[in-house]
Image (spheres, rainbow, N blue to C red):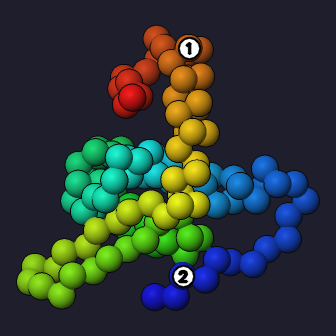
Amino acid sequence: METTPKKCKYSWPIEATLDVIGGKWKPLVIYQLKEGTLRFNQIVARVQPRITQRMLTKELRELERDGLVTRKVYAQVPPKVEYTLTKTGESLIPILDQLCDWGSEHLADEIEFTCEE
């Protein structure tokens, strides 16, 4: 699969950023990869029951296409696939940490899980 980022023209930098990482699942997936490489089923286990495997596959493909995640497939049975943040993906971690801090501070009564430190 080709990993060339899509080419778009945006009016604002934040619009471009949200196009790449926006939505309900991408920030959660990126945040799960912050400690290092994970296999597909490890990511599923960390974000379920909130995401389906089909949706996770779609989100990972888009993150790979946009250069935030690399995918490594091992030629074995059963197939083994690992996902790792790229340097560009890693650069989002401080931003996601700040979003976690903001949520903890302002929405603590509504939050089931805590941010990993």
Q: Quadrant of residue 116?
A: top left
Classify residue 103 by image quadrant.
Answer: top right
Mark 2: which secondary structure? loop
Considering every residue shown, the one lying at the far left of the view is 77
Asked if residue 32 lies left or right of residue 59, the reply is left
Which numbered disc, 2 or 1, marks the residue that appears first in the sequence? Answer: 2
107 is higher (above) or lower (below) than 67: above
Toward the viewer: 47 or 73?
73
Examine the rendering and report whether any part of residue 58 can be seen: no
Query: Tag 1: residue type?
Result: Glu
Q: What's the distance in space between the residues labelled 2 and 1, CA to CA?
A: 37 Å
- Residue 23: x %, y % from top left: 58, 51
- Mark 1 Cα shell of 10 Å, populated few (<14), some (14-19), many (≥20): few
Residue reaching furthest to the front: 87
Label 2 crowd (10 A; few <14 / some 14-19 / many >=20): some
State the residue at coordinates (31%, 59%). 37
Q: Is residue 27 above or below residue 86?
A: above
Question: What residue did someone put label 1 on?
Answer: 105
Q: Residue at x 23, y 49 (%)?
A: 45
Image x and y of residue 52, in percent: 33, 57
Which residue appears farthest toward the right when viewing the image?
11
Q: Residue under label 2, please give it.
A: 3
Amino acid type at mark 2 = Thr
Rendered position, 39 above or below 99:
below
**Residue 74 falls left or right of residue 93:** left
